[in-house]
Image: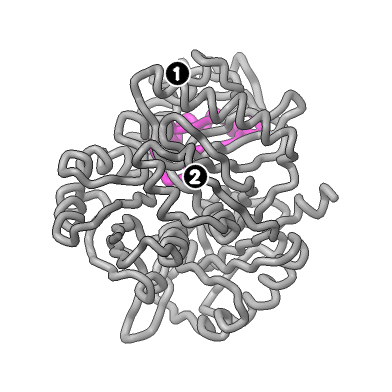
C-alpha cells in the first residue's frame, strides 16, 4: 500500500523510517517532509494546514492511508476531510482532537469521568484569574487553553510569576488566540513520564513508557522547550503503575470520549505526573509525541503500518504488538539560543559519519541549500542510540553525537539522569 505522512519534524521522520520497514508498504509520500526523509519518501512541498491541498495530494497519489504527525492538521479536521473522499487516516477526527486542542475540554472530560488529574479552574477574564491566584497562592500552573506548540504552560513558583503569566497569556497574547482563556491548575509534585497508546476507539494498547526532558539546560534548568531529549523505557513507570495507567486513565478516557460522541482513534498521548497518590494526567495530546516517538518506535518490533491500519479499521484487538527488551536514548541537537532567538542556514557536518556508527539521526529542523544540509529550526536533529540498558545507550549516543557539528550547536549532556538517580 501507499502512505502519505503529514509533517516535517523529527517525529515525522521517525514515523516514516518505521513505516518504510513494513512489508505492506510500497511507497511513502510526505508533505512537506524534510531532507532526512528524502531517502525513504517522496517529499512534496506544501502546507500541513491546507486541507484542500492535502486531500488533493492523497487523491492524486491514490494513497491507502494518511498518517498525521502534528496536532494542527488534526484540530483543523484533516481526518474528517480525508474520510469524505474515502481515504483512511491514522489520527482522531476534529471533534475528538479537542482532547489536545482545548485544555478546558480535556479537563472537563477528566473531571466528569473521574480520571485522575490536578484540581483546576478555567478563566476567560484576566482579573478573575488573578483573583483566583491571590486566593490559591503558589506554586501554581498556568496553561493557555488552546494550541501553543508545546510552550503555553508556565509553572509559576511564586505568586508574582503567576500574575505575570496571566498578563503574558491573556493580555499580551504571547500565544495568540490560544490565550483567550486559561486553565489554572494546582501544582503536582512528582516525576513526569509519557505513555503513548494505540487505539481504534474501543481497544487501547499502551506503548513503552518514556520520559521527556523539557527544560533547555542540564539539571532541568532554564526555559521550557519542545523537548531536549528522551529515553525509554522510563523506570519511574513500574509494571504496577502501568496497570494503573491502563485501567484508571487510558481505558476510561477512550470510553468517556465514545460516550460523549467523540470516538477517538489513532495515538493517544498521556503526559503523566507520578505522584504519591499514583499517576495523574498533566495533559493529553492527540498524536505521537516529539521527541518521545524517536525512542519509542525504534523499540517496536511489530509492523507499524499493520497496527495503524487496524486502528483506522477498528480491528486493533486482533493485533499482537511486540516490543524490544532494549533501551533507547534520544539527544536533541539544537541551534544555540533556542528556544529564544537562534540562527538558521548553518551547514551540518558529519551526518554520514554518525550514521555509519549505527546511531539513528532523525532530522527535525533541517533544509537543503546548494546541495548541503543546513539548520532550519531550533531543534535541528534527534540522535538516537539503542543499547541493552539505558547506560549503554547513553554512552553510545554521547560518543557518536560528537561526530556531528554545526555552528553554535547545543545539546544537553544529562539526558536520562533521572533513570540513574532512581537506581
Q: Is residue 169 left or right of residue 387?
A: left
- Residue 146 colored magenta? yes
Point out which mark residue 127 bears: 1
Q: Position of residue 61 (x, y in %)?
A: 18, 61
Mark 1 nearby-residue class (10 Å; few <14, some 14–19, many ≥20): few
Q: Nearer the viewer, residue 167 or 197?
A: 197
Q: Position of residue 201 (x, y in %)?
A: 41, 31
Mark 2 nearby-residue class (10 Å; few <14, some 14–19, many ≥20): some
Q: Nearer the viewer, residue 374 or 49?
A: 49
Q: Which residues are magenta?
A: 142-169
Q: Position of residue 327 (x, y in %)?
A: 69, 59
Residue sticking out furthest to the right: 423
How many marks do you count on the picture? 2
Q: How is the image coloured?
A: one colour
Q: Is residue 145 left or right of residue 240?
A: left
Q: Can you see residue 304?
A: yes
- Residue 153 colored magenta? yes
Q: Residue at x 68, y 51 (%)?
A: 233
Q: Nearer the viewer, residue 197 or 170?
A: 197
Secondary structure type for disc 1: helix
- 277 shown above or below 399: above
Point out which mark residue 319 bears: 2
Amino acid at each position: 500500500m501507499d502512505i502519505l505522512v503529514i509533517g516535517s519534524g523529527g517525529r515525522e521522520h521517525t514515523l516514516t523510517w518505521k513505516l518504510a520497514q513494513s512489508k505492506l508498504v510500497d511507497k511513502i509520500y510526505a508533505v512537506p517532509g524534510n531532507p532526512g526523509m528524502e531517502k525513504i519518501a517522496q517529499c512534496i512541498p506544501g502546507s500541513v494546514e491546507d486541507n484542500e491541498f492535502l486531500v488533493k495530494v492523497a487523491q492524486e497519489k491514490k494513497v491507502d492511508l494518511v498518517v498525521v504527525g502534528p496536532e494542527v492538521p488534526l484540530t483543523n479536521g484533516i481526518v474528517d476531510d480525508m474520510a469524505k473522499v474515502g481515504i483512511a487516516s491514522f489520527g482522531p477526527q476534529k471533534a475528538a482532537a479537542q482532547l489536545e486542542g482545548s485544555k478546558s475540554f480535556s479537563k472537563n472530560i477528566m473531571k466528569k469521568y473521574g480520571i485522575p488529574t490536578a484540581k483546576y479552574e478555567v478563566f476567560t477574564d484576566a482579573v478573575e484569574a488573578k483573583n483566583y491566584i491571590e486566593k490559591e497562592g503558589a506554586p501554581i500552573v498556568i496553561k493557555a487553553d488552546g494550541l501553543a506548540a508545546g510552550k503555553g504552560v508556565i509553572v509559576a513558583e511564586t505568586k508574582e510569576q503567576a500574575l505575570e503569566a496571566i498578563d503574558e497569556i491573556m493580555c499580551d497574547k504571547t500565544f495568540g488566540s490560544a490565550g483567550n482563556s486559561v486553565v489554572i491548575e494546582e501544582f503536582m509534585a512528582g516525576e513526569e513520564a509519557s505513555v503513548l497508546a494505540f487505539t481504534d476507539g474501543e481497544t487501547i494498547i499502551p506503548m513503552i513508557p518514556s520520559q521527556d526532558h523539557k527544560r533547555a539546560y542540564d539539571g532541568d534548568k532554564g526555559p521550557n522547550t519542545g523537548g531536549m531529549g528522551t529515553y525509554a523505557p522510563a523506570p519511574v513507570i513500574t509494571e504496577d503503575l502501568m496497570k494503573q495507567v491502563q485501567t484508571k486513565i487510558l481505558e476510561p478516557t477512550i470510553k468517556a470520549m465514545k460516550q460523549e460522541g467523540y470516538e477517538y482513534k489513532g495515538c493517544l498521548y498521556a503526559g503523566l505526573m507520578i505522584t504519591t497518590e499514583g499517576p495523574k494526567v498533566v495533559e493529553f495530546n492527540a498524536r505521537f509525541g516529539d521527541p518521545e516517538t524517536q525512542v519509542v518506535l525504534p523499540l517496536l518490533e511489530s509492523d507499524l503500518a499493520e497496527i495503524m491500519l487496524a486502528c483506522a479499521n477498528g480491528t486493533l484487538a486482533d493485533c499482537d504488538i511486540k516490543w524490544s527488551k532494549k533501551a533507547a536514548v534520544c539527544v536533541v541537537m539544537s541551534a544555540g539560543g533556542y528556544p529564544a532567538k537562534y540562527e538558521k542556514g548553518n551547514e551540518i557536518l558529519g551526518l554520514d559519519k554518525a550514521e555509519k556508527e549505527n546511531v539513528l539521526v532523525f532530522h527535525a529542523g533541517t533544509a537543503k541549500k546548494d546541495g548541503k544540509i543546513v539548520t532550519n529550526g531550533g531543534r535541528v536533529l534527534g540522535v538516537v542510540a539503542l543499547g541493552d540498558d539505558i547506560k549503554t545507550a547513553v554512552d553510545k549516543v554521547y560518543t557518536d553525537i560528537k561526530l556531528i557539528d554545526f555552528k553554535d550547536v547545543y545539546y544537553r549532556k544529562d539526558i536520562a539522569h533521572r533513570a540513574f538517580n532512581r537506581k
